[in-house]
Every structure is written in structure tokens, then in C-alpha cells.
Amino acid sequence: MATYYNFTIQDCYSDRTVTADSTSYIPAGNNTGGDQTVAWHSWTMSFEPETDEQREARLKQEQEQELVIKAAEELLKGYIGAEAFGKLYEVGYIELDSQKYKDCRYRVKRNHNAVVEVVNKDGKVVDKLCFQPAIDCPAPDQLLTKIVLLELAEEFVLAKANHHRQGL
């Protein structure tokens, strides 16, 4: 069984302090804008074992997150169908026909942080679209949002998304 800790890391140059727990991601540096990056030069760490109350709260939150993700997966499966849902988890993406570009398809990847690839009839990626919901939601909900927007509001997505054109 893993032991969880709460800890604090302090940057000795700026006296910046980051407090987190052992399940959090602590960055190796902090991008402050432009080309300037502040690296954590040295740190002081104080470790405190997770209390029973913290453990119970963490386990409850993990259970709630699992239920939310399962509900989001069921909603996605209901929208795209069981066969497409199975293919999504098998190959890692689902493809949608573009209404605007007759020779292209959208490849929406399962990874919620992934860009949507625009693929031509030869299977070559010609553009990548970066867009996602403005709120934090489970990965299946983000995927469903991308699918619905591409199907119902393709022009809006193309106007608002960040484009990373490939060889155009």
C-alpha cells in the first residue's frame, strides 16, 4: 500500500512556496513568460504522513471521480454507438467526415489533451486543430464535446481553434 504525504517545496531564489500532496505533479520549473524560466534550485521539504481523515477524503474523491468518468463514458457510448466506442478504445481515435472539406476527415483522439487531426483522402495529416472545453471535465466529456462541435458547428470550430498546418 502506498504512503501518501503532504509536502512543501520552496524556491530559494524567490522564496516561492508550492504546497502539494504526493499525488500532485510538481513542476521542475516555473515558466514566468517569455524565455525566462525559473528552475527550482534547491528545496526544503517537510513530509507529513497522510492522516486518516485525509485518506478517507482522498478515497471518497477517487470513488466519486470514477463514477463521473463511468457516467461520461456511458454518455459518449450512447452518442457514438457501441461499435464506434469499441473502435475508439481499440485504435485510440474516431474519424468524422468533414462537411466543409469533401476530401478530409477529422481524427478525434481519445486522449483528452490531444489535438484533432485533419486527414486527407491519402491518410496524410494536413492540419491539427487545438480546441477544448473551457471548463475542467472528464476526458470522455471533452471528447464528446469535440465530436458534437465538429458535427454541428464545424465552421465555428475552424474559426476558433488554433491551427497547426502540416505542409499546406
Image (cartoon, helix red, strand yellow):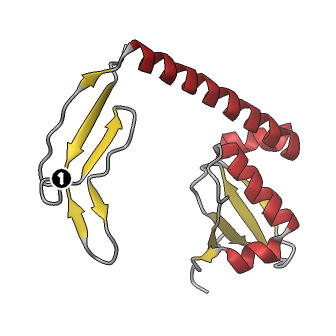
Q: Quadrant of the N terminus?
A: top left
Q: Nearer the viewer, residue 146 or 167?
A: 146
Residue at x 69%, y 70% (from the top left corner): 118
Residue 99 on image: x %, y %: 87, 73
- Mark 1 neighbour class, 10 Å CA radius: few under 14, some 14 to 19, many 20 or more: some
On the picture, is 91 further left or further right than 32?
right
Q: Quadrant of residue 16?
A: bottom left
Residue at figure coordinates x 71%, y 51% from the top left: 143
Which residue is outermost to the bottom? 168
Task: Give the image location of residue 72, x and y in percent.
Answer: 74, 38
Residue 85 sits above or below residue 98 on the image: above
| Drawn side of residue 117 relative to residue 58, left or right | right
Is residue 107 shown left or right of residue 44?
Answer: right
On screen, residue 4 versus residue 128, left or right, reads: left
Judged from the image, the secondary structure of the residue bearing numbered disc 1 is loop
Q: Residue at x 81, y 77 (%)?
A: 155
In the image, residue 2 sits, relative to residue 34, either above or below, namely above
Amino acid type of disc 1? Answer: Asp
- On the image, the x and y values in percent for residue 144 come to 76, 51
In this rendering, does residue 86 appear at all?
yes
Q: Residue at x 31, y 51 (%)?
A: 27
| Residue 147 picture location, percent across and down | 78, 57
Task: Tell which of 154 and 43 is nearer to you.
Answer: 43
Q: Quadrant of the C terminus?
A: bottom right
Query: Residue 121, can we see it?
Result: no
In the rendered view, tell whether residue 131 sits above or below residue 90. Answer: below
- According to the picture, the residue beneath numbered tag 1 turns out to be 11
